[in-house]
Amino acid sequence: MTLPFPLILDGGFATELERQFGKDLRGRLWSAKCLDEDPEAIKAVHISYFEAGANVATTCSYQATIEGFLEEGFSQEEAVGLMKKSVQLAREARDAYKHKHPDDTESRLIALSMGCYGAKLANGAEYTGDYGNITKQDLIHFHKDRLLLFLQEPGIDLILFETIPSALEAEAIKELIKTWKDETLPPIGIAFSCKSDSQISDGTNLEECIGYYDNLEQVVAIGVNCTSLKYITSLVTILADKQRQTNKAVLVYPNSGAIWDAEERRWVSDSKLSMEMFYESMANAVEKCGTKVMIGGCCGTQVNHIQYLREKLFI
């Protein structure tokens, strides 16, 4: 499948589950708990982002793993069913939106959220890259096992490896993609979490990490996510330079700039991200990278940010 750029992604998913439905998501499963407790809320959030103008519904699977569900008392069969349900719900939401808007001509895609290994640990490691003594082979198996399971469900248009904080994990994902035997693998995007204007969360230079995927045709988009807006301008400059070499799309969806409190399992912030600041940052990305971009929001961004972006930038 060839992706139709530019694409507007959705925004913070857990943010909207909390805002619209008052969900308490501080447990180890985070938003994935709603796959069991309230799947209709998940569908409603997907639909609200489509209504706001998003082209992409990202599955509620960032923190969904077999091990995570087992640790919370689910059976193996239940865990498998809930992981597949994340894709089913996104697909049902898209179908419902298209049914309501039969004249809609925009692309409405399903992106599979492949959260990093740090999401499984549920200790904030996606913002440090501190995975202890894990090996690259361990990380390859972690992502391969999940991906094989998710891909049993039809309708996935795009795979997003999200919030990657570690160069070792970036290498593992590269090896997994290189050795994948199924030629029908959907297009892939890779997004890193960054701690500065040039480094991913473990301190490795972003420029080095994005270079791992230069020669992988399956990887069609490279960028950053769940990273503070204050770093985005400099990071986009790095991504734009790489784009001129590889012609891959630039992928950018920052968070609100809040800090994740791993002990309390919540975002801590003394201010909210204005729609104008968010829009200006995304408009800068388009100015530097052209229309071969995928832009949206991550934790702390809301439906109104995406709606404002759509209205100001592409309508």
Image (cartoon, rainbow, N blue to C red):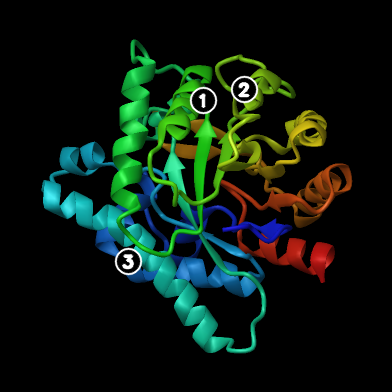
Three-letter code, disc 1: Ala
Q: Position of residue 171 (x, y in %)?
A: 50, 21
Classify mark 1: residues with Cα within 10 Å, few (<14), some (14-19) or many (20+): many
Q: Residues within 10 Å of mark 2 (few under 14, many from 20)?
A: many
Which image quarter is the N terminus in?
Answer: bottom right
Q: Which mark is residue 39?
A: 3
Sequence-earlier tag: 3 or 2:
3
| Relative to 236, 52 lies left or right | left
Residue 213 versus residue 83: which sits nearer the camera? 213
53 relative to 28 in the view: left or right? right
Q: Which sits in the foreground, 279 or 141? A: 141
Residue 223 sits in which quadrant?
A: top right
Q: Quadrant of the C terminus?
A: bottom right
Between 184 and 20, the one lying in front of the other is 184
Q: Nearer the viewer, mark 1 or mark 3?
A: 1
User: Which residue is most to the top?
Assistant: 133
Tell me where residue 165 appears, x and y as whole percent. Answer: 53, 25
Counting other residues with Cα less than 10 Å from the Cα at mark 3, is it few (<14), some (14-19), or many (20 or more)? some
Assign a secondary structure to mark 3.
Answer: helix
Marks 1 and 2, Cα distance to the nearest angstrom? 7 Å
Q: What amino acid type is highlighted by mark number 3? A: Pro
Q: What residue is shown with label 1?
A: 170
Residue 166 in percent (x, y) is at 51, 21
Instruction: From the image, tell me which residue sits under label 2.
Output: 209
- Asked if residue 28 can be seen in this view, the reply is no
